[in-house]
Amino acid sequence: MSAPAGSASPFRAVDIIRKKRDGDELSRAEIEYLVSGYTAGEIPDYQAAAWLMAGLLRGFTRAETTVLTDAMLRSGEVLDLSEFPAPKVDKHSTGGVGDKTSLVLAPLAAAGGLIVPMISGRGLGHTGGTLDKLESIPGFTVGLSTAEFRRVLAECGCAMIGQTAEIAPADRKFYALRDVTGTVESPYLICASIMSKKLAEGIDALVLDVKTGSGAFMKKEEDAVFLAELMVETGERMGKKVVAPITDMNQPLGRMVGNSLEVAECIAILRGEGPDDLRDLCLELAAWMFHLGGSAANLNEARSKAETLLKSGRAMETFRKMVELQGGDPDAIDDPQRLPQAKYSLDVTSPRAGYVTAIQCESIGTACVILGGGREKKEDSVDPAVGITLHKKVGDHIVAGEPLCSILYNSEALAIRAKDLIEESYRISNAPPAQKRPLVHRVIQGSGNKN
């Protein structure tokens, strides 16, 4: 990487800002100079913010995006997992409501012989976070040292932790700045942020679950496709196998929204039970993980392998072992009633008979946050027990007075706020929806991943 800003350098930050402002392509050396200088504290926030805004408005080329990703990746530690001979494969979701597949996929893929070094995040906005879900398991710790992380990987094939201070520190600084300067939405910056963190895990391949719909950050499918194509190409340019299914987030995934509720639903899936949509998406994503990892000749064979691992109970055994290795109470996995439970329940009933034709998914996620299941402010604590159980989803028939969902709560005042929002989020019509949206809209593949 280029020398930091404070050392002898042919560059000035203001010149790089002007160049991007005018729509010109930056060189590798210029991007590396700016990333290393800002990370080291030698380029001030106001210049980095100006550069981010110029990039948001002017965009970046694919080559610039790859260089930016690489510079952010190499700003910190890149894990070397070469002591594990098995393929290293991970999955990342762009975020949604009830989006809990990681808790099934990590042990499912590991049970099939892959190494899954999953570094996850917390809830963001109306979406839930994998770390918050895991921490609802009594005793579970996501703050493992690198040595502990490797030990868990060696013993059960998967580990799920939070981002360490050593992983992509440039991304942490740039993300905080983007959050307060109106530059979060840039697909190029989103790509660099996601890919720098995931590729720092030392993986060989990555499955990206790119959500679209009312509960996703990318509400328009064309925006989701653009981001997916950008991330797949960036990963390939950096020597990794990457595939990105575009999946539906126009209603919550599964029937549970809330941290301990979603853990319980994942346990049900691992036992061969649970809702069909969650099971089907887990099998689809697991199939791609096995296919990219080279442990199946084609996608059909990979899906059959995933189904067999679920039915045999091996994925469940791997999840229980990972929980125990990371300090969690395995009895809570055997009996999900030992997970945190809310004190009270309140039904949200339908005002009329008909069919559920739409659910404003983001509103369901926001209602869960209001209950305490997420953070309205960064410093807020999360109540692991609260959430929403969906009794009716899109296409279901309902009679007047029948429950649409149940609110599980610990504060009546918060439950009333959440109830108002949920009531507004359901659309009931006389006729069922004309057609059911597919769970997987399409799959973006790189040139080397064609099935």
Image (cartoon, rainbow, N blue to C red):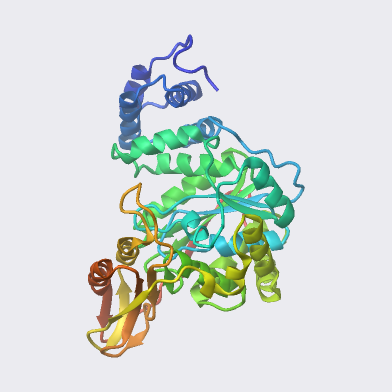
Residue 342 location, x and y as percent? 40, 71
- Is 224 placed above or below 392 here? above
Residue at x 56% of width, y 57% of height: 140
| The C terminus: image quadrant | bottom right
**Residue situated in front as seen by the camera: 287 or 360:** 360
| Lateral position of residue 290 relative to residue 66, left or right | right
Residue at x 68% of width, y 52% of height: 152
**Residue situated in front as seen by the camera: 288 or 107:** 107
- Is 229 placed above or below 106 here? above
| Lateral position of residue 214 relative to residue 104, left or right | left
- Is 124 placed above or below 388 here? above
Instruction: Report the number of discs.
Output: 0
Residue 306 location, x and y as percent? 66, 68
Residue 109 location, x and y as percent? 66, 60
Residue 307 location, x and y as percent? 65, 72
Residue at x 43% of width, y 23% of height: 34
- Is 46 placed above or below 166 here? above
Residue 155: name its quadrant: bottom right
Q: Look at the image and tell me whether residue 87 can be seen.
A: no
| The N terminus: image quadrant | top right
Q: Look at the image and tell me whether residue 191 can be seen.
A: yes
Residue at x 65% of width, y 72% of height: 310
